[in-house]
Amino acid sequence: MSASILGMSAPRARVSRSALEANIARAAAGDPDASIDLRRDACGHGARIVAAAARAAGVTRALADDPAVAAAEGLREARTATLPLESVFGLRGRGEPVLTLATPVLQTKRLRAGDGVSYGYLHRADEDTRAALVAGGYAQGVPRAIGGRAAVLIAGVERPVIGRVAMDVCVVDIGDLEVRPGDEAVFFGGPAPDLLGRWARATGWSEIELVAAPGLSARREVAA
């Protein structure tokens, strides 16, 4: 994989403002002293984004690494956070998922039966198929343990991650799907709400850990 291809794109952490505001409003309902946790860049969701959503949802206090971030959105400093992170970010079925981790397809290629994939060739194709190389690996917070144990959404279909997750990429078995370089794959979130739970079972990580790790390193976008 050439440096030019790797440099052309990377995973994107797409944060839904509407989902965030709705989740916060629901979690804070009936609690005039509700406070929100903005530490570690709001677990990779963007402290300023989450602070603005909290203010829009009627929350007035925040626990932050940098109080100036909260103050910039008119939030007073809090000593503790009362709103559960799972409810704020729509994890474990508590509200609408806020962060979608999406990534571009970099390459596709044919695999013949017996061809090995990724480090150590731990995966070998059982039959002729096609594979897609997608941006995002353990350097971007994608856990290595999902290799051969979890899936992504690509061309609207769940397809398995095969072989070991590499530093900046991973490989997906796409079979006969119409997939081309530049198409989008979704690791988890919005259009694939069930995938994160499967990642959690495959890795032993909590959903908040799985979201925070790539959220802190991926390029962030704000969606409606």
Image (cartoon, helix red, strand yellow):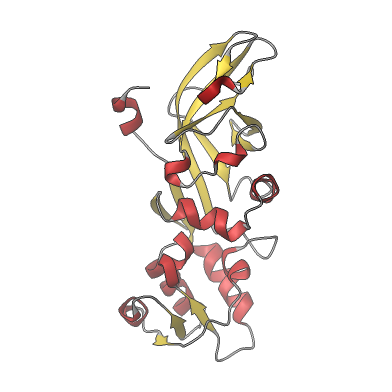
Residue 159 percent across, percent down from the top left: 65, 30
Q: Residue at x 63, y 58 (%)?
A: 206
Please, is residue 75 above or below residue 212 in the view? below
Please, is residue 76 above or below residue 166 in the view? below
- Toward which corner of the image does residue 9 lie, by quadrant? top left
- The quadrant of the image that shows the N terminus is top left
Count of number-bearing discs: 0
Using the rendered image of the protein, determine whether residue 178 is visible from the camera's viewpoint: no
Residue 113 percent across, percent down from the top left: 65, 8
213 vs 195, left or right, is: left
- Toward which corner of the image does residue 131 lie, by quadrant? top right
Residue 22 percent across, percent down from the top left: 58, 70
Q: Front-most of 193 and 162?
A: 162
Q: Front-most of 33 and 145?
A: 145
Q: Front-most of 111 and 13?
A: 111
Given the current orientation, which residue lies at the most extreme bottom position? 32
155 vs 149, left or right, is: left
131 vs 169, left or right, is: right
- Toward which corner of the image does residue 174 lie, by quadrant? top right
Using the rendered image of the protein, determine whether residue 173 is visible from the camera's viewpoint: yes
Given the current orientation, which residue lies at the most extreme front position? 120
Please, is residue 123 above or below residue 95 in the view? above
Q: Residue at x 42, y 67 (%)?
A: 40
Residue 45 percent across, percent down from the top left: 46, 61
